[in-house]
Image: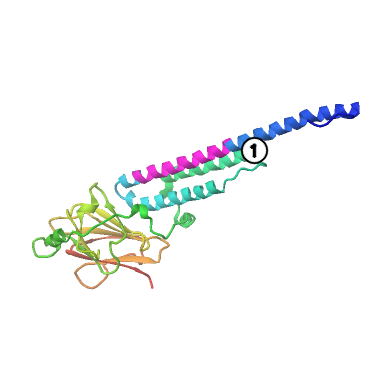
């Protein structure tokens, strides 16, 4: 308490009038500080909820069927990039004694808008025009979450691809590229892709599918993210549909040739996505950079 002995009565009255003001100001600053801490905790909870939603979305994406499978990875990758940005913002959040209620509300409103955009994108993401799709950043590094652990099965591979017992059974070989780091999954009906794909050896270039009627998709994330889709096998003729897809902005290119002639039967050079029916037993896969 300030020393008041010997202070004139007028100054003592002024001192007593100012003291409640200082205490009121101090209480107000403490209250603002507590509000800032509470709002910061709410923002941290929102970030954790975004991470949980991203994990749930990843699980749902693996269960989707049909043509939506081709687009799921770009959407998941975009979702994860957005969550990474949230994490960076979380690290950057520091309490500030100058933050007001208005600025706190504005920050929360901005986070709410971003969360709403993320939820809407999962529904209408395919409606975004191509000329603005480049605004969503995409990483070139391999996403370890989507790589499929595949192991050789030489015995079963040779039964289906070597000899004359299965003339219509489809077999694949990579003339460029391999299955070392790929995302392989069922395309239409669910099955265990790690058991269905029969790989010749540790070079991971030659492979086949156990049941030819099982459609599958292979994505090569470390080779520009190109896709190969196998579907619609006809057991009477051995014909099947091969679909190839590349990223619009990627310099990587994928093409396929069969045993009939030396030409490229299907190629992504001039088309981001293309499909063709091929009827030879062997399918040759080529993945390279243009130029």
Q: Is residue 16 above or below residue 51?
A: above
Quarter of the figure with residue 26 = top right
Magenta region: 38-59
Please indicate whether residue 77 sits to the left or right of residue 171 in the image.
right
x and y, in percent, of residue 103 in the image:
63, 41
Q: Main secondary structure of the magenta part?
A: helix
Question: Can you see residue 266?
Answer: no
Identify which residue, 291 or 182, lies in the foreground.
Answer: 182
- Does the magenta segment cover residue 40? yes
Question: Can you see residue 283?
Answer: yes
Q: Is residue 141 above or below residue 35?
A: below
Q: Which residue is mark 1?
A: 102
Q: Quadrant of the C terminus?
A: bottom left
Residue at position x 83%, y 30% from top? Answer: 15
Residue at position x 38%, y 42% from top? Answer: 56
Q: Is residue 201 above or below residue 92?
A: below
Please indicate whether residue 77 sits to the left or right of residue 98 in the image.
left
Identify which residue, 74 or 7, lies in the foreground.
Answer: 7
Q: How many marks?
A: 1
């Amino acid at each position: 308490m300030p020393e008041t002995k010997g202070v004139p009565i007028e100054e003592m009255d002024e001192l007593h009038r100012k003291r409640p003001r200082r205490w009121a100001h101090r209480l107000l600053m403490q209250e603002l500080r507590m509000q800032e801490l509470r709002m910061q905790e709410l923002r941290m909870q929102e970030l954790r909820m975004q991470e949980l939603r991203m994990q749930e979305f990843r699980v749902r994406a693996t269960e989707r069927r049909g043509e939506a499978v081709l687009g799921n990875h770009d959407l998941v990758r975009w979702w994860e990039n957005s969550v990474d940005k949230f994490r960076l913002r979380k690290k950057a959040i520091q309490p500030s004694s100058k933050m007001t209620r208005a600025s706190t509300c504005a920050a929360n409103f901005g986070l709410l808008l971003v969360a709403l955009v993320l939820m809407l994108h999962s529904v209408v993401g395919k409606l975004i025009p191509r000329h603005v799709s480049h605004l969503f950043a995409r990483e070139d590094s391999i996403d370890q979450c989507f790589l499929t652990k595949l192991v050789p099965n030489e015995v079963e591979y040779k039964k289906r691809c070597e000899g004359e017992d299965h003339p219509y059974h489809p077999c694949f070989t990579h003339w460029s590229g391999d299955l070392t780091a790929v995302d392989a999954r069922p395309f239409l009906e669910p099955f265990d892709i790690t058991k269905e794909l029969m790989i010749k050896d540790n070079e991971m270039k030659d492979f086949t599918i156990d049941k030819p009627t099982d459609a599958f998709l292979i994505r090569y994330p470390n080779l520009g993210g190109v896709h190969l889709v196998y579907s619609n096998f006809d057991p009477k003729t051995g014909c099947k549909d091969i679909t190839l897809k590349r990223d619009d902005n990627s310099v990587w290119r994928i093409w396929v040739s069969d045993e009939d002639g030396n030409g490229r039967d299907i190629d992504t050079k001039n088309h981001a996505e293309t499909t063709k029916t091929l009827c030879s037993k062997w399918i040759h896969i080529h993945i390279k950079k243009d130029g």
